[in-house]
Amino acid sequence: MKPNKGFSLIELLIAMLILMFVMIGFLAGLIKYIQFSIDARMKDLMDKAVKDWSGYLESLPYNASCSPVGYSFGSAVCDLSTNQCSFENIDSDGDGIPDFYDPYSGNNNNYSSAPLSTASWLWVGPTIANLTCNNYPHPTTYSLVGNRRVYTALTVATITATGGAEMGRAYGITAWYFSPIDRRYKYESSLLIKRKP
Ligand SMILES: [Ca+2]
Ligand SMILES: [Ca+2]
């Protein structure tokens, strides 16, 4: 009987191959885990941005003088008992998101590589303008997770009665990011209606 001289070359190669597959599997899992945890942090910041901006616009005096001035969305007719507004049905790029909450003209998933190319109808956005309202400092228009941004944009319309008198203002608040998992557009929107005092 031959004495056992340890591992043969073949056995060593097989062991190394197995180890390599285990390592590749482990690394793939680790990368997925990191992507999911970044996505979760970005989603938290997106939720926070919508809440912060809603609270800010809510607290702003109706007659605060703000720049940029004017209504990015012109006038709208809203049913103030149900908060249903005429702009909810306007979707000029046909992607299923009303313009009032849509920061991009066209399919939003296509903007992951050009996130600053926002649509013309925004009132405030990542590159449109910083909002200045007297002495009322506003929340940031974007926040960061590493070098990835979570964006915020606003639209605004005046709410008019039949006959044209201003009854209030409607604000569209949208926060969004492109997912680190699949680069798709993820967003959250909110409508804030302020009645004229
Ligand atoms: Ca749209
Ligand atoms: Ca769009």
Image (spheres, rainbow, N blue to C red):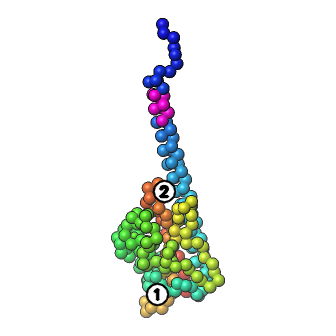
- Secondary structure at numbered mark 1: strand
Q: Residue furthest right?
A: 135
Work out which quarter of the rendered image holds the C terminus and state it.
bottom right
Left or right? Give the position of 172 relative to 61: left
Position of residue 181 measured from the top left corner of the image (x, y, whole percent): 47, 54
Magenta segment includes 15: yes
Q: Amino acid at mark 1?
A: Thr
Give the CA separation, mark 1 to mark 2.
42 Å
Res. 87 visible in picture: yes
Instruction: Report which quarter residue 78 is drawn in.
Output: bottom left
State the residue in front, 169 or 1. 1
- Secondary structure at numbered mark 2: loop
Magenta segment includes 61: no
Contact (CB < 8 A) between labels 1 and 2?
A: no
Beta carbon of the mark 2 residue lies under 8 A of ligand 2: no
State the residue in front, 68 or 22. 22
For disc 1, the marked residue is: 160
Position of residue 35 measured from the top left corner of the image (x, y, whole percent): 51, 52
Q: Earlier in the sequence, mark 1 or mark 2?
A: 1
Say which residue appears at 52% left-offset and 57% top-offset: 39
Say which residue appears at 55% left-offset and 53% top-offset: 37
Position of residue 152 measured from the top left corner of the image (x, y, whole percent): 52, 71
> Which of the labelled discs sits on residue 124, or is there none?
none
At label 2, counting other C-alpha atoms closer than 10 Å, the crowd grade (few under 14, some 14-19, many 20 or more) is some
Assign the magenta stretch its main secondary structure.
helix
**In the rendered view, would you say 47 is above or below 67?**
above
**In the rendered view, would you say 150 is above or below 137?**
above
Q: What's the magenta region?
A: 13-20
> Which of the labelled discs sits on residue 180, or is there none?
2
Q: Amino acid at mark 2?
A: Pro
Say which residue appears at 49% left-offset and 78% top-offset: 128
